[in-house]
Image (spheres, helix red, strand yellow):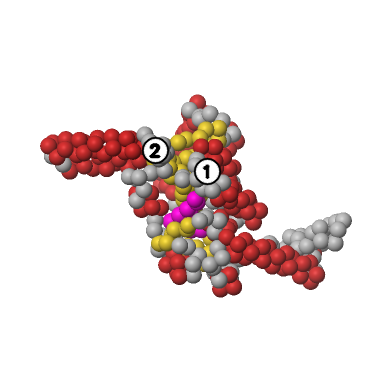
Amino acid sequence: MPNFLVSYGLFAAETLTLLIAFAAAFIFVVRVILAARGAHPAEQLEVNSLNRHFTDTADSLLAEMLDRREWKRHIKVRAAQDKAKRKAQSGTTAPTRLFVLDFEGDVAATQTVALREEISAILQVATTRDEVLLRLESAGGLVHSYGLAASELRRLREHGLKLTIAVDKVAASGGYMMACVADHIIAAPFAVVGSIGVVAQLPNFHRLLKKNDIDIELHTAGAYKRTLTMLGENSAAAREKFLAELEDTHALFKAFVGENRPQVAIAEVATGEHWYGTRALALKLVDQLKTSDDYILERVHDHDIFSLRYRRRRSLRERLGGEFTRLATSLAGRFR
């Protein structure tokens, strides 16, 4: 009898595992099909009024707090304020607008593609009275990728638009390369700022390959076509050249920050260290301690505020990869 119970238990466990696998595969396929059917156009710029958003959320709260008479009085006052605002805007002076963008950086700064489109759209309609607020979150990444992202932001300033960058969590290394372009930088008190430095590392398997009698041949034309490698034997000259290139990149980074933030003592902050917002303010890496939410709320009543987000429809392979990652993460969370 015990052997039967053990065998039955193993059979039941195997059956349950198969059922879970089939169910997961079925859910995976269904989600991909539904996503494909409901996909956005290949390219789409989403524009939303944040004035309307904040008005609606405030009204939802007031509707529960106020009695019927107070609510009617509130509606009348709101209508009078809206009328006065429209009348003021009907003159020759156009309303001041605040365009709000978001940048969530990865190692390759892939959101630069969307940032480019958003900025190009703004430059076609904005006046020099308008302002752009970029809510930036990035711990940095590839130099050339973040260099391009920073160059895209400089387009705004070159066209006479005020650029404010808000750092609620982190703008370090390449993230700070982007942030320093702004006219004004705000940061939350415990946001991570700085890391003006350059880092590179790679493993080397030469001794392991040599131990197993595996030869690697590397042929180059040009003395410095390749410096350090992962598989070949690295020489002192190659290391020296690699370090020289790192130092040169760091020098360019420091020069870029110094050009855009002349008030910063570069020698003091370009050590690769990072600081929290409060310390960053003392070092003049940022200009003000404030969250992006407060910055927007302060301008709700005298600015027309629009959030912009450029979306590109992902390919089938990207959607499959994304769904697989989410499914794997979900299963790992359930069974760990």
- Number of numbered discs overlaid on the protein picture: 2
Relative to 212, say whether 282 is above or below. Answer: below
Residue drawn at (45%, 36%) of the image: 47
Q: Quadrant of the N terminus?
A: top left
Q: Which residues are magenta?
A: 162-171
Q: Residue furthest front?
A: 92
Residue type, label 1: Thr
**How many other residues sit within 10 Å of disc 1, few (<14), some (14-19) or many (≥20)?**
few
* Residue at the disc numbered 1: 325
Is residue 79 highlighted in magenta? no
SS of the residue under disc 1: helix
Residue drawn at (36%, 48%) of the image: 299
Residue type, label 2: Ser
Q: Earlier in the sequence, mark 2 or mark 1?
A: 2
Image depth: mark 2 or mark 1 in front: 2
Query: Taken as a whole, is the magenta stretch helix, strand or loop?
Result: strand
Q: CA distance from mark 2 to mark 1?
A: 33 Å
- Residue 126 on image: x %, y %: 50, 40
- Residue 134 on image: x %, y %: 48, 49
16, 194: nearer the viewer: 194
Q: Residue furthest bottom?
A: 268
Q: Is residue 309 left or right of residue 259?
A: left
Does the rendering let one see residue 327?
A: no
* Residue at the disc numbered 2: 49
**How many other residues sit within 10 Å of disc 2, few (<14), some (14-19) or many (≥20)?**
some
160, 271: nearer the viewer: 160
Tell me which corner region of the image, top left, top right, bottom left or bottom right, holds residue 207: bottom right
Residue drawn at (28%, 37%) of the image: 84
Q: Is residue 245 left or right of residue 87?
A: right
Is residue 169 highlighted in magenta? yes
As drawn, the label of residue 240 is: none
